[in-house]
Image (tube, rainbow, N blue to C red):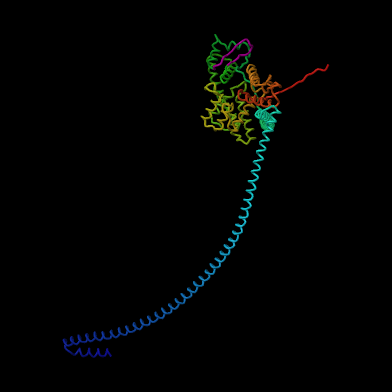
Amino acid sequence: MINSMVSAMLLMLSSLPAYATALIAIGCAAIGVAATFFIYREYLKKKFEGAKEEAKRIVEEGRAEAKSLRKEALIEAREEKQKIREELDKETKERRAELNRMESRLQSRDEQLNKKEAVLDSKQQDIEAAKNTLAQKESQLQKAEEDLKDRAADIEKELERVAGLTREEAKEALRNELIEEVKKETAQEARNIEANAKEEAEKKAKEIIALAVQRCAADHSSDLAVSVVALPNEEMKGRIIGRVGRNIRALENATGVDVIIDDTPDVVTLSAFEPIRREIAKVSLERLIADGRIHPARIEEVVDKVRVDINNQIKEAGENAVFDVGVYLHPELVKILGRLKYRTSYGQNVLQHSLEVAYLSGVMASELGVDVKLAKKAGLLHDIGKAIDHEVEGTHVSIGVELCKKYKENPQIIHAIQAHHGDVEAKTVLAVIVQAADAISSARPGARRDSLESYVKRLENIEAIANSFEGVKESFAIQAGREIRVMVKPEEVDDNKTFFIAKGIAKKLESELEYPGQIKVSVIREIRSVEYAK
């Protein structure tokens, strides 16, 4: 309808003048706007009414839901309240039951305490009665003690009168008798203990030493301070002497030894305390004799060559010794060790002695559970100071210690070197092993050569020490000083005192003398009664 109206209006407008048409258009526009306004207002009104109804519906639904939630919350609250009430009732019942139980226990304890109190009261009464009884008995005992004292005093007076001794004199006599008896028992017990200990110790020591000696059999050779060179004929002596003795002087100057040509046929003697120089001179002279050309220039040439050869032999000897023992040494120590090949002590070759001590130390160390390689090295180095004791001041022990410190050897080895002659006390098993091995090697028959003077002097010192003890009649050192037999005066020394005399002599020998191995001390007390029947 609106479209028809619009079409009619458009036809009317097309027949009207322009200003009328404009006015009509304006009026139509206003009417359209107004109509549109009224139409939109109606639309909005209907829309608002619908929204209002929707809001009202939502509010009603919210109220209904809130009412339902409130009802549910009230129900849950009532249920929770009921649950809490039931739990409180249950806890209350449990606490009441616990209180009842505690009350019953307290009541039971109270009854027990009452019973104990009654028992204690009864015991207290018994104790009081016992105290009274003890007091009565104590008074009776005091009275009896006084009576006994009086009787003891009377008996003591009677004994003094009968024995003829005062109480103090009798006490002194009894004390002396007890002391003598205790001394006898102590000596007997000490003798038994020492005998058992010695028996066990000697048995074990003999086993170890015997095993060590059996497993080490080294050759011994006694070297003198002179060397002898054999000559092919007497004519060679003149060639060795040379014109106006120039060849001998050249040899002595080059080697540092004394060349002795005496009436002994076909030999030349070389004398020098330093064995390496003596060996150089001996080998040089032997080569000169074999070569036949003997004059000062040739002598110096041969001596220089031999010196180089001997130094090489020294190095090789040290290396062989280290290899044989199975240890490692600093190269400089190896060179110094090799010099011991030409060093002797009491006629015993020191390198051979050192090797034997190393072997013995290793065997004993294995038996005693000590480091075998460490023991072998200590035994090999114990006399290394003797290699250069002609060049350096000091004892061979102090020189050996300084050498080993210089080349960073093990402190245990250094201590063993210090202690092997007793210069310091042996504080380790290793040091004791080296001491024993050194003594065994030195004490072998033929190992060392001893002069008659020192031998006799040692025997005299042993006998003098034994004779210095009170009660000793005479003493005899036998078996090359390895045993001393002491005769005591039987009227002054009893059997028990012989034990103390033997022990005292042994201790004094240990402290005052130096000797290889051990010295057996035998104290003999003898009483003889002789009568003749006629």
Quadrant containing the N terminus is: bottom left
Which quarter of the figure has residue 261?
Answer: top right
How many numbered discs?
0
Could you tell me if residue 449 is visible in this image? no
- Which residue is rendered at x = 49% and y = 72% of the image? 85
Residue 244 found in image quarter? top right
Give how far across and how far down residue 74 sits, in percent.
45, 77
Residue placed furthest toward the right: 534
Q: Nearer the viewer, residue 76 or 40?
A: 76
Q: Is residue 261 magenta?
A: yes
Quick one: quadrant of the C terminus?
top right
Q: Position of residue 151 (x, y in %)?
A: 68, 35
Please report the residue visible at 24 percent of the width from the left and 85 percent of the height from the top.
Answer: 34
Q: Position of residue 490 (x, y in %)?
A: 71, 22
Read off the magenta span. Answer: 255-271
Question: What percent of the width, then of the height, locates residue 439?
Answer: 63, 26
Task: Pick out the residue farthest to the top.
Answer: 244
Is residue 378 on the magenta stretch? no
Q: Is residue 316 placed above or below 228 in the rendered structure?
A: below
Q: Quadrant of residue 168?
A: top right
Front-lying residue, 183 or 496: 183
User: Depth check: 33 or 486 in front?
Assistant: 486
Who is closer to the viewer here, 384 or 491?
491
Residue 106 visible in the shown view: yes
